[in-house]
Image: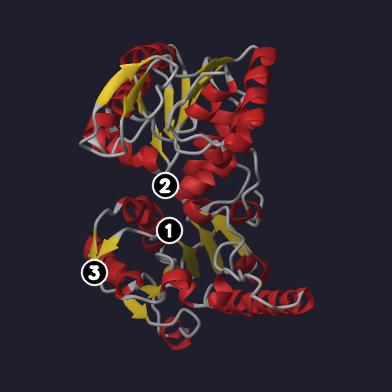
Amino acid sequence: MDKKTLRDVELKGKRVIMRVDFNVPVKEGVIKDDTRIQGALPSIKYVLEQGGKLILMSHMGRPDEKGITGDTTMKIVADYLGKLLGKDIVFVDDCANADAQVAAMKDGDVVMLENTRYHKEEQAKCKQKDGESDEDFKARKAALKEEQKVLAQKLASYGDIFCNDAFGTAHRAHASTAVITKYIPTSVAGFLLEKEIAYLGNAVEKPVRPFVAILGGAKVSDKLAVVNNLLTKVNTLIIGGGMAYTFLKAMGHNVGNSLCENDQLEYAADMIKKAKELGVDFLLPVDNVAADKFDAEANTQIVGQDIPEGWMGLDIGPKTVELYSNAIKAAKTVVWNGPMGCFEMEKFNKGTFGVCAAVAEVKANGGISIIGGGDSVAAVNKSGQAAKMSHISTGGGASLEYLEGKQLPGVVALNDK
């Protein structure tokens, strides 16, 4: 990675304001999964060991849409992290009003700021209101962007060094992820961000071949740019999940009541053609688990590439699991983003778990396996195979945009080495 990291700067006595991704699932005040908190610990501990003063900031949930609730306060995470570190953490209930607490810090102290998204200017996103003129909307948008700069400046004033260790929000140009870098002289990557970029970057730009990418999930439209970009990089592209039925229909198959985006059929046909021209193996399901309704108690049957009328495909079938597994096991680099079916229901989890078992063998055989965020991570954890993967990404949207070949604002803004 050509960006500076925490190792490249002197931290003793310095105030380090660190953007972490503590957007963890919370229910009734209890953290249900601390993966993201654990992921940030190496950077946090390093700053403290080096004698720095650490100010942590993050968002949690979507308070902009659902309103401010008890389950989106960072106080829950501050208490949890305090126990993990075995030290008191000073919590500040407004991220834009922490001057006194920061001024009182000694070396080795930790301050945690309240949810950055409690301020609308963090994201600075707004929609045109009904009846609002284009001119008024533009003016309101511009004013919000100015407010975003003010918030970023305020956050920057707490630190001598900015560290971004939040890969999960690195694709967002928010006040606390990218805009802050304009107002602080030193901006570096944390160890989690460094690791994410190293794995994903090398996989896409310098893969050890054969390179196999597995894409699943519901919609083709969510992965348009990813399919397009990966076809120029991979040896084999495997498609599963709901998105497979758009490709199957584009090839002339019947898909019954399966999820299908008819407005993407032309694109799907183009991608199949492009794969052929590039000599990429483009694998689609050869059999499917079809159900008569979207329900855990549905009647099911194994069918081929055509789904009968009145039925819907909810998982890949056993022959497809075998086909995909053979391709995966022959790979030296595997990137997986998106499940093969509705794995949350037991009747439709065999495809996802079968693929998961094959991906788990890649590392054991000397290859690299990268799980690209979101539902794939949930599936890997549920299948009990997480420890057998080379790298499990903490960022769903960010890893997808990286696989699309996009620059991530939260990474671009950091200091070059």
Kindly identify which residue carries mark 3: 29
Report the number of numbered marks: 3
In the visual, does 344 lie left or right of 396?
A: left
Within-10-Å neighbours for mark 2: few <14, some 14–19, many 20+: many
Residue 76 picture quarter: bottom left
Q: What element carries label 2?
A: loop
Q: Which mark is residue 21?
A: 1
The percent position of residue 91, horizontal first and vertical second, equals 34, 78
Kindly identify which residue carries mark 2: 394
The percent position of residue 128, horizontal first and vertical second, equals 66, 72
Mark sitting earlier along the chain (3/1): 1
Disc 3 vs disc 1: Cβ atoms closer than 8 Å?
no
The percent position of residue 305, horizontal first and vertical second, equals 44, 16
Residue 366, compared with residue 124, is above or below; it is: above
In the visual, does 226 lie left or right of 119?
A: right
Q: Is residue 92 visible?
A: yes
Q: What element carries label 1?
A: loop
Given the current orientation, which residue lies at the most extreme front position?
309
Q: What's the residue type where badge 3 is placed?
A: Gly
Mark sitting earlier along the chain (2/3): 3
Foreground mark, 2 or 3, reads 3
Q: How far apart are marks 2 and 3 (CA)?
A: 22 Å
Within-10-Å neighbours for mark 3: few <14, some 14–19, many 20+: some
